[in-house]
Amino acid sequence: METPVESTRERLLNIAEQRFGEGGYEGTSLRAITVAAAANIAAVNYHFGSKEALLRAAVARAMAPVNTERRRRLDQLEAKGRPTAEQLIRAFVEPGLDLVLRRGERGPVVARFIGRIAFDPSQRIRELYAAESDPVEARYLAALQAALPRSAPESVAFGYVNMLGLLALHQSQALAKPPGDAVDPVDDPGKLAENLIAFLVAAFDRGLRA
């Protein structure tokens, strides 16, 4: 059974994910979060210490399972030898999109939150996000550079940054819905993953060979 203290902390984190995902860090007031969470500023100060610390805790909670799964997959691939670019892209992209698949009703909220914060206009907020994701992401970049020896390291890094951007755009649901009767990718994360992986594999294979 949860204690009242645990319940308040979880409510604050849940609402922070939702509001930061919708309005970004600067566009979301601490008061809006506390009112929605039926809490007060004192509760934020008690559990986290500040608005930025609340964001940091929310990012850490959201990224922990993603980082763990990405690390597990990379360890597994490297234990078998040098992985291909396609294997690395799949191992990186799928855990990010699994935020939608494996978190029930909160999945889209968490995914939108991560996608929004990863490319927040504030450099300070991007650095805060990077502190949670960089250790694993650096390993993937190095592995991709090893898997694409015919491409210059800086070209692979350029492709890698664009992969991060595309993934964040889909997570944040910032892309427009397809025209006509096409299935909205957000409504079918499994199909979205396959389409995105195929697109990225082709981009790395064709665009970075020269």
Image (cartoon, grey):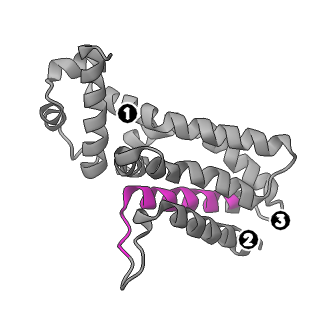
Outermost residue, front direction? Answer: 1
Where disc 2 sits, the SS reads helix
Point out the frontmost of discs 1 and 2. Answer: 1
Question: Which residue sits at x=73%, y=47%?
Answer: 142
**Disc on the earlier residue, 3 or 2:** 3
Question: Label 1, on which residue?
Answer: 58
Q: Amino acid at mark 2?
A: Asp
Q: Amino acid at mark 3?
A: Arg
Q: Is residue 101 above or below residue 6?
A: below
In the rendered structure, are the residues bearing label 1 and label 3 in contact, judged by CB atoms less than 8 Å apart? Answer: no
Which SS does the magenta portion mostly show? helix
In the rendered structure, are the residues bearing label 1 and label 2 in contact, judged by CB atoms less than 8 Å apart? Answer: no
Q: CA distance from mark 1 to mark 2?
A: 36 Å
Asked if residue 48 lies left or right of residue 93, the reply is left
Residue 40's spot in the image, x, y percent? 13, 23
Question: Label 3, on which residue?
Answer: 150
Asked if residue 119 lies left or right of residue 204, the reply is left
Question: Which residue sits at x=63%, y=62%?
Answer: 159
Name the disc covering residue 197, or none. Answer: none
Name the disc covering residue 205, or none. Answer: 2
Q: Amino acid at mark 1?
A: Ala
Q: Which residues are magenta?
A: 156-177
From this viewpoint, is residue 51 visible? no
The quarter of the rendered structure image containing the N terminus is: top left
Judge by depth and name the residue closer to the eye, 8 or 31: 8
Where disc 1 sits, the SS reads helix
Residue 140's spot in the image, x, y percent? 68, 47
